[in-house]
Amino acid sequence: MSELRIYADGSAQLLQRVTDGQTIAASLAAINVTFERWQADRKLDATTSNDDIIAAYRPSVDRLMKQYAFQSVDVISLRPDHPEREMLRNKFLSEHTHSDFEVRFFVDGRGLFFIHDQGKVYGLLCEAGDLISVPAHVRHWFDMGARPDFKCIRLFTTPEGWVANYTGDDIAKRFPRFDDYLASHAA
């Protein structure tokens, strides 16, 4: 189940825990982050091609592409046996920004986004069916876990806009990593 945890940024004290999708969306909209839940228009499985995955969500993809002038869409998949999983995970564990939106729709699996804004940190566990869109220049980090297992649709205005610009703040070290978060999520 998707979950939003809101923390004080200085102490990492938990202020609020939300699992209702509408409340998650409203809480994140207050900081200009979009959270939506999408449904495929057909059954998907592990053998579904990337083109067919995008086609299954075409109305939602097209709506966002038009609304934000996105120029391209693709599908990325990362599995527990990926030889570069540790390097890829470490690339996004520190607080950073992008000069473009970071848009991820989880076709399957899950990942943990943290957004640092207005004196708070918003930890969002995204699961299959969840879309998150973090605007340009918003401080955040992402943890896919030690054994990543997800497939996502990504949207871009330009691929160059998705380069991580690290803030130099070590705030991410004060918050739970994916595996610890999942252990407490199940509790």
Image: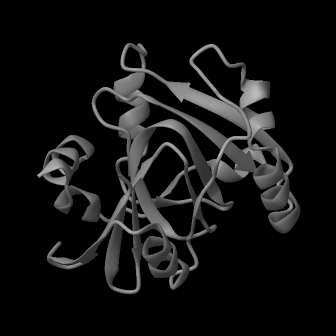
Residue 160: image x %, image y %?
A: 73, 47
Which of the colour schemes (rainbow, by chain, secondary structure, one colour) is used? Answer: one colour
Residue 70: image x %, image y %?
A: 82, 55
The quarter of the displayed image where residue 131 is located? bottom right
Q: State the residue in front, 66 or 22.
A: 22
Can you see residue 157?
Answer: no
Residue 68: image x %, image y %?
A: 81, 65
Q: Residue at x 55, y 26 (%)?
A: 77
Q: State the residue in front, 34 or 52.
A: 52
Describe residue 160's horizontal placement relative to residue 130 as left or right.
right
Describe residue 68's horizontal placement relative to residue 146 as left or right.
right
Is 48 situated above or below 143? above
The quarter of the displayed image where residue 8 is located? bottom left
The quarter of the displayed image where residue 121 is located? bottom left
Q: Residue at x 42, y 46 (%)?
A: 92
Is 127 situated above or below 132? above
Describe residue 127's horizontal placement relative to residue 120 as left or right.
right
Q: Residue at x 41, y 28 (%)?
A: 149
Is 85 situated above or below 116? above
Residue 161: image x %, image y %?
A: 70, 53
Describe residue 9's horizontal placement relative to residue 142 as left or right.
left
Q: State the residue in front, 81 or 131.
A: 131
Can you see residue 132?
Answer: yes
